[in-house]
Amino acid sequence: MYHFKNNWLPLEYLPRAEYWFWADNLVLAIMLISGGWLVFSGRRTLWIHLHLCAALLYFGILKGGCICPVGATANVALGMMHPELVGRATLALFILPLMAALWRGRVFCGSVCPIGAIQQWVSPAKRPPLSASLNHIFAATAVILLAFTIFAVLSGMGFLVCLLDPYKPFFFLGHAITQMLLGLAGLLYQPAPEHTLWIGNAEMWGWFTAALAFGWLVPRFFCRALCPYGVLLGLFSIVAVKKRTLPEETCKKCLKCREVCPVDAIRTNNRVVSVSPYACIQCGNCEENCVGLLSKEKS
């Protein structure tokens, strides 16, 4: 198979101006704040989904998959040995979602991440929860991949874990089309030849198709089992200032919330229903479908 990327020799590479990175930081900060506000202000999940659409358009399509949770983790791991290779803007892109997690939990996952947006749309609205043992396996796999990400970068093996991202061809295709349209309009600020070359890679599109199909069976599979950055966000969310809670006084124990939770964050213990701050991605589905809250609002 002919690999476009491996056979392309760049004549000149012009890195993006640093102010574009800081512009990305500003957009990210604004979207994290607005996403956190939407989640905890009682707004319908429709608004959160629209917020995800905006994040996908900007970070996924316009920026070609930037920011990438997997790549950000690898970049910062590289900075452990070579700080000069990680700029302040890149470091800020890594830190901002973690700060938001300390504030409101994993709002990045539920309302800002472009990878999460794609998974959200291919997942069924309701489905039986997975077994606790399978969820534990997914969580352990993500931790192992986080450790492997750091080890691979520090040992000189490169960003091998980035190969796990199945959504790159979609982002790169959207980015290439956007760049073409901007070029026709005379607004092209930086060509991205490497992104366009990935469009012809059949292996990547096959992995992308398989990820979409598997995402129907296991909602948010990438978030739960393959994203090393999600491990960090989950750990920060455990000590968040504001965590997701369900009303104990009006809880009907109907477990409707479990049916709509895409990451099985709803836990039951002796008929007590709680939300795992580590797993919760702050999508708002549980509150919107809570029979206890709905009956309280009607009364």
Image: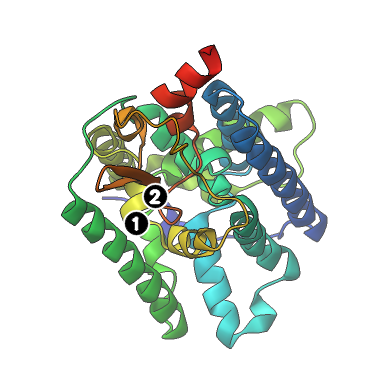
Task: Find residue 80 and report its horizontal and vertical position in percent.
Answer: 57, 83
Q: Position of residue 107 (x, y in %)?
A: 57, 46
Question: Which residue in the protein does label 2 denote?
Answer: 223
Kindly identify the residue that appears in the image at 43 percent across and 57 percent down: 278
| Residue count near mark 2 (Cα–Cα under 10 Å), binned few <14, some 14–19, many ≥20 | many
Residues tagged 2 and 1 counted as in contact (Cβ below 8 A): yes
Disc 1 marks which residue?
A: 226
Residue at 39% x, 36% y: name it. 119
Amino acid type at circle 2 is Cys
- At horizontal 67% and vertical 58% (from top left) the residue drawn is 96
In the image, residue 227 above or below residue 186: below
Residue in the picture at 31% in, 70% down = 144
Q: Is residue 256 above or below residue 226?
A: above
Q: Position of residue 173 (x, y in %)?
A: 50, 36
Residue 91 — which label?
Answer: none
Looking at the rendered structure, the kind of residue marked 1 is Leu
Dot 2 lies on which element?
A: helix
Residue closest to the eye, 152 or 45: 45
Residue lying farthest top?
298
